[in-house]
Amino acid sequence: DFEFTVKADGSVTLGTIAQGETVVAENGKITVTDNAKKHEVEFSKVKLGGEELPGARIEIYKGDTKIEQWNSLETSTVINLEAGTYRFHEVYAPEGFVAVTDFEFTVEADGSVTLGTIAQGETVVAENGKITVTDNAKKHEVEFSKVKLGGEELPGAKIEIYKGTDKVDGWESTTDSHTLSLEAGTYRFHEEAAPEGFVAVTDFEFTVKADGSVTLGTIA
């Protein structure tokens, strides 16, 4: 509410207007502007498994105008948005992860949120006013070469790669090396069967680091 006074000459003056509200009196006319209602929208930046992922730089745009920006933390972030369509932009992802492709989302008049098109292979979910964005772990090419003494490629070995108890891949060696795309983490190399006339190596662990380099565990 606000007060206004009509003077003897017909002019109008306004009393105190609440902060953030717009009321104008001019030439006997009072113009009152209603602000658009804002809704709380929660953003959760996670990795596979649902754990919050700190270190991502996020920007929200409406058209070409940047509305908000923040760095993801170990808790979700809540911002207030008017009804309308916005664009989510991940400037950069935390080390070892891949930034999601830009996507649009719409805040409806009732505060619900709907998503635009999400890039194939990426995971974004909107539910109860909360947008959960999952960053995929970055993958690195790791080349495996199965050779005999002298360095010549050795075909016929059956190889399996495990992460924990899960088999990530398996192949039979040929006269060419074999390349896999692996996320950062620790894996186990298992030679299920060696070529005739050769002995299979003992299982060993290797670690793919966030920068793509590879280190070996204990070798028999």
Image: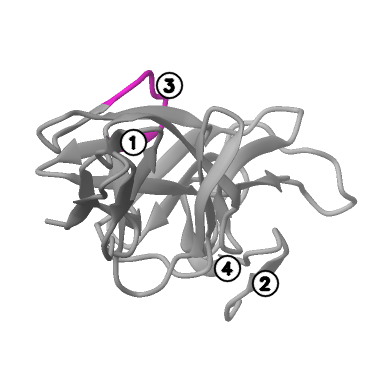
The verdict on residue 119 being magenta is yes
The reply to whether callout 2 and callout 4 are in contact (CB within 8 Å) is yes
Mark 3 or mark 2, which is nearer to you?
3
Type of amino acid under label 3: Gln
Picture residue at 26% right of the left edge, 62% below the top? 15
186 vs 15, left or right, is: right
The reply to whether callout 3 and callout 4 are in contact (CB within 8 Å) is no
Q: Secondary structure at mark 1?
A: strand
Disc marking residue 215: 2
Q: Is residue 182 above or below residue 204?
A: above
- Judged from this view, the residue extending furthest toward the bottom is 218
Question: Can residue 195 be seen in the rendering of this structure?
Answer: no
Query: Which contiguous range is marked in magenta?
Result: 115-124
Type of amino acid under label 1: Thr
Packing grade of label 2 (10 A; few <14, some 14-19, many >=20) is few
Mark 3 or mark 4, which is nearer to you?
3
Packing grade of label 4 (10 A; few <14, some 14-19, many >=20) is some
